[in-house]
């Protein structure tokens, strides 16, 4: 069985440093992230192997197409977040929240229930010289905590999760928040109540997406 370097689940930060490299996502060269690559063992570990070692799937170790597209849009249109309080939901690596801070957001809360993702977000924010608040609380269904803008990258891959997120975020939009989704055509993206803002061709890898490029769109919830 392939073993990751310095296997210590009790210290997520040390694990991330030992098993990733700093890379610039193809669509977002302004940002550096601790990401898995072909030359580090975690890239090749199966979900079963990860579970046996006490590790959740390392969604935080990849710059997913939906997150790249939404980050690109935010950086190119900083007025969307400038001076506003932002929620980066299902943050993973923290890419979207970091992009929002670089675009002039007043504050960002990056929410991800995975403690390894939380450690990754903190490390990546430090590398990019921005300040991002992090929570591992499951906030689906919670009241708005002062967020003006809600950003969601690539979270529509499972029906129950996508449906619960949609119901919750639509309730926040009805109360006055603005919400955007970055999505590369996942099965459970809502079929209505969305306005397409822009699309990008996002370079990816066949190990992640079975293709070299994903046509990925940014949607506004209306």
Image (cartoon, rainbow, N blue to C red):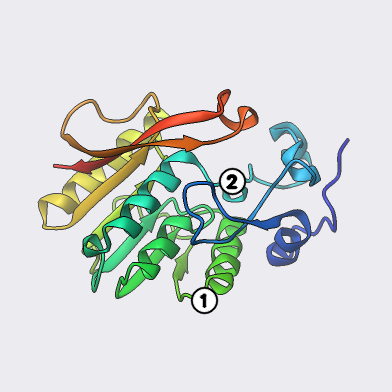
Label 2 to label 1: alpha-carbon separation: 20 Å
Name the mark nearer the viewer: 2 or 1.
1
Side of 150 relative to 45 (left or right): left
In the image, which disc is placed on residue 79? none
Which of the labelled discs sits on residue 129, or is there none?
1
Q: What secondary structure is found at the residue carrying circle 1? A: loop
Among the 4 quarters of the image, the one containing residue 124: bottom right
Q: Could one spot residue 143 in this view of the protein?
A: no
Above/below status of 101 relative to 53: below
Can see residue 221? yes
Residue found at the far right of this picture:
1
Is 124 placed above or below 51 here? below
Q: Which corner quadrant holds the C terminus?
A: top left
Q: Is residue 182 left or right of residue 214?
A: left
Q: Nearer the viewer, residue 7 or 198?
A: 198
Marks 2/1 in contact by CB < 8 Å: the verdict is no
Residue 95 percent coordinates (x, y): 48, 57
Identify the residue shown where x is 17% and y is 48%. Answer: 171
Where residue 153 appears, x then y in whole percent? 40, 45
Q: Residue at x 31, y 72 (%)?
A: 104
Picture coordinates of residue 60 (x, y %)? 58, 50
Rendered location of residue 200, percent (x, y): 37, 37
Q: Is residue 170 left or right of residue 71?
A: left
Q: Indicate left or right for 35 with 145 as reference.
A: right
Asked which secondary structure carries label 2, the reply is loop
Which residue is labeled 2 in the image?
62
Within the image, what quadrant is residue 79 found in?
bottom left
For the residue carrying disc 1, how many other residues have a C-alpha within 10 Å: few (<14), some (14-19), or many (20+)?
few
Note whether 107 is above or below 174 in the view shown. below
Name the foreground residue: 149 vs 137.
149
């Amino acid at each position: 069985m392939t073993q990751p370097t310095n296997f210590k689940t009790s210290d997520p930060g040390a694990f991330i440093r030992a098993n990733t490299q700093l890379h610039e996502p193809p669509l977002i060269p302004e940002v550096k992230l601790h990401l898995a690559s072909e030359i580090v063992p975690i890239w090749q570990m199966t979900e079963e192997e990860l579970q046996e070692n006490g590790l959740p799937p390392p969604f935080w170790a990849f710059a997913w197409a939906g997150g790249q597209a939404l980050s690109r849009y935010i950086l190119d249109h900083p007025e969307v977040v400038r001076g506003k309080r932002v929620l980066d939901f299902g943050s993973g690596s923290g890419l979207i929240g970091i992009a929002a801070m670089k675009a002039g957001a007043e504050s960002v809360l990056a929410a991800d229930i995975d403690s390894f993702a939380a450690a990754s977000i903190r490390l990546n924010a430090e590398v990019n010289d921005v300040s991002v608040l992090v929570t591992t609380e499951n906030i689906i269904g919670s009241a708005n905590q002062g967020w003006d803008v809600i950003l969601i990258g690539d979270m529509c891959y499972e029906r129950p999760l996508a449906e619960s997120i949609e119901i919750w975020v639509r309730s926040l939009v009805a109360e006055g928040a603005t919400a955007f989704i970055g999505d590369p055509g996942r099965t459970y993206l809502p079929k209505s109540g969305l306005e397409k803002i822009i699309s990008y061709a996002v370079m990816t890898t066949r190990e992640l997406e079975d293709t070299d490029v994903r046509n990925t769109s940014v949607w506004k919830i209306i």
